[in-house]
Image (cartoon, rainbow, N blue to C red):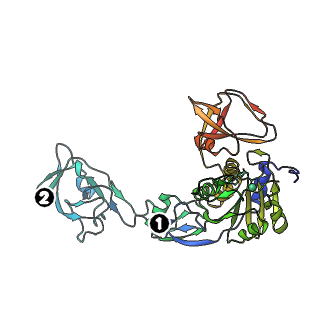
Amino acid sequence: MTGFACRSSVAEAIAWTDNVFPLLKTEKIAIGQSAGRVLAQTITSKVNVPGFHRSMMDGFAIRAVDIEQAAESEPVALRIAGDIYPGTPHSVPLSSKQTIRIMTGAPIPTGGDAVIPVEDVRVRGDQILVSRPIAEGKHVGTPGEDVVSGQRVLATGRHLRPQDVGLLSSIGIDAVGVLCKPRVHLVTTGNELLPAGTPPTDFMITDANSPMLESLVVRDGGDVTSAGIVPDNPECILNAFQAEADIIIVSGGSSVGLEDYVPQLLAEHGELGIHGVQMRPSSPVGIGTYKKRIVFLLPGNPVACLCGYDFFAGRTIRKLTGRGTELPYSRQILPLGEPLVSVEGRKDYVRVQISEGRVTKSTRQGASMLFSAVQSDGFLIIPEESSSLATGTLVTVYRY
Ligand code: AMP
Ligand code: MG
């Protein structure tokens, strides 16, 4: 057993990871499933939206010229010559001093050039009385006013939003090419682990990390598979690495203990680029590659596992799924209610409480204290360059 020779900074670990970024395949999927996915093609509209002149109001289609002289004292009467509903054109053109009752979305009849909202006319039998002129084109939607044929509407790399999906449908597209979700394989190591749902007994503990990691990967848009609980045995671990995956996340056995085989295994059979990071918790993080897969070695202590995931594995997954590289928590900038002490040269992930607009450190900070991450409001990060933060310092709290 020997300790870490030297630890990398968080920035170095991230830079190394960005260099071994996996390339994802693409697939064609129905647009209904595409929100949250990354578009792998450019989308150009082949149609105008709308494709025709249409009414924007429930009212009366008219010829603006017919009511040019309309006034409160001298209303103009127009004869109602029919009704038009959305989806069906009117067969007869609108002639002089006529109007056609029209619903929102219905095509403007030939000859018509404006719509008077129903509220602005008086209906008298088969006539309407109009007391004011309106401009040509009023309440008429024109072809291509939303999307013009030939217009590029979405670019490759777009993280598709619900309104994007709606737009795709409106221009007649029902399937799009997207990046495949990164396939993330979980390898949870530890001879002391019992599977989820088993009460802990004697000296055995129940696996907290796999269900947590699975939820994190799903949150970040990855597809999860799992090797289940794998014993601390080099052969078993190497065997678990053979899965079809873009990313392997190993929980436990990442440090320098006698049973921590994973770093050595990776160094021998793949590449161990980073081992040990200047941060707390999660200092025993490792990052490497194994046959085109990126491998993240996360410490077994659950809070270290959570922090290491968010900083490294999660960051890569979020980047691949178009979610960007920021931590996926809402932020609040608030003053510290007490001083915080750290060590220069190390990044600290500190669980905190917010009370009356002030931030204080949660009482239990141990890397194994997962309940503390459950009870805390969030965490803050003390950067490498700070050794302590005074009361009142404005800090960014990432809210769990
Ligand atoms: P390791 O990273 O394997 O040295 O484990 C560090 C600590 O985390 C030990 O106390 C382990 O028992 C514990 N641990 C390892 N894996 C898990 C897990 N999946 N869930 C909860 N605790 C774990
Ligand atoms: Mg272990």
Helix, strand, or loop for circle 2? loop
Q: Position of residue 383 (x, y in %)?
A: 75, 40
Foreground pick, 217 / 153: 217
Q: Where 102 sits versus 376, above or below?
A: below
Q: Residues within 10 Å of mark 2 (few under 14, many from 20)?
A: few
Foreground pick, 169 / 200: 200
Q: Can I make out residue 69 in this image?
A: no
Outermost residue, left side: 125
Outermost residue, front side: 202
Q: Cβ–Cβ below 8 Å for labels 1 and 2?
A: no
Q: In the figure, residue 114 lies in which quadrant?
A: bottom left
Q: Quadrant of the C terminus?
A: top right
Given this view, does label 1 or label 2 mark the residue nearer the observer? 1
Q: Position of residue 84 (x, y in %)?
A: 24, 64
Q: Is residue 327 rendered to the left or right of residue 283?
A: left
Q: Where 85 sits versus 202, above or below?
A: below
For the residues labelled 1 and 2, the Cα–Cα distance comes to: 46 Å
Which residue is painted at 58% across and 65% down in the image? 39
Q: Is residue 140 rendered to the left or right of residue 144?
A: left
Q: In the figure, residue 243 lies in which quadrant?
A: bottom right
**Residue 381's mark?**
none
For disc 1, the marked residue is: 32
For disc 2, the marked residue is: 126
Which residue is painted at 43% across and 60% down in the image? 145
Helix, strand, or loop for circle 1? helix
| Type of amino acid under label 1 | Gly
Q: Can I make out residue 121 in this image?
A: yes
Q: Position of residue 120 (x, y in %)?
A: 23, 48
Foreground pick, 299 / 195: 195
Q: Position of residue 47 (x, y in %)?
A: 45, 69
